[in-house]
Image (spheres, helix red, strand yellow):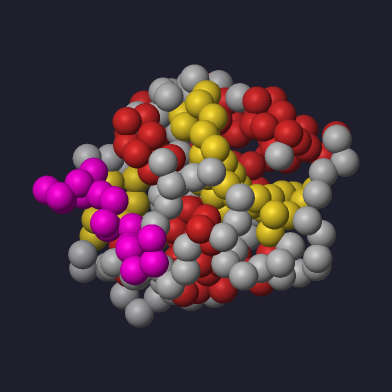
Amino acid sequence: MRVVFVHGACVADGAWWWQRTAALLAERGTSSATPALPSCGEGPRPAGHGGPGLDDDVAAVRAVLEDGDEPTVVVAHSYGGIVTAEAAAGVRSVRHLLLVSSYLPEVGQALADFGPADGPAPFLDVDAGAGTFGVRPELLVPTFLQDCDQQVQAEAPDRLARQGVAVLTQPVRAAAWQEVPSTYLVCARDLGTPASLQRGFARRAGAVVELDAGHHPFLSQPEAVRDLLLDL
């Protein structure tokens, strides 16, 4: 089995976010990969107006998924669920989706459809002039990493990224979770995407597991995430 991890919005360096779970999986003989998302500035074109969008993220993830025929579990985190919905559709090697505090869009839905109606979440900073948005650095740890250790909390801010606003409104053209077995991991202590919202999204998944963790359980409780993946 292979695991492909698709990271969330406004961050870069997916291998860093996934490192603790990846190391534990490797000890059990399971490889993993972490595609870069161009809309987060992970590529030759800068994020912003005219820069990469959802289509570019989908293409980047799909290229990794189609590289070989090894049975694959896709771990989609937060915004990664938007990308995975389209990127994993129709890929024969994909056997299961693990959705971690993730969005599960129907065909035609976009990331903005899941946000508050009265504007951006308070932890986001939108620069309309530059065409980017990002997490406010001072709110990263208290909102998303409150249950992680000091090393993670100290290193994570360096992995924040500005992301192109185009991804907020670009709709998905496929919904892989409708055709591939899926498990939703509800993070009960998540302060960025409250558990009540996650449980609503989870109704679309085939199975639901709940963990007493914040937004990044693959960093705060990697053993639990490893064990869930190996069970899949």
Q: Is residue 65 left or right of residue 158?
A: right
Numbered circles on residues, count: 0
Residue in the foreground of this view, choosing between 95 and 219: 95
111 magenta-colored = yes
Dominant secondary structure of the residues highlighted in magenta in the image? loop
Which x, y percent locates residue 103?
Answer: 41, 49
In this view, which residue lies farthest toward the left? 118
**Residue 97, horizontal then vertical, whole percent:** 60, 49
Q: Foreground residue, 146 or 172?
A: 172
Give the position of the C terminus as an image quadrant: top right
Residue at 37 percent of width and 30 percent of height: 195
Image: 35 above or below 53: above
Residue at image point 62% right, 70% down: 90
Residue at image coords 25%, 49%: 115
Q: Position of residue 177 (x, y in %)?
A: 52, 55
The magenta span reads: 106-121
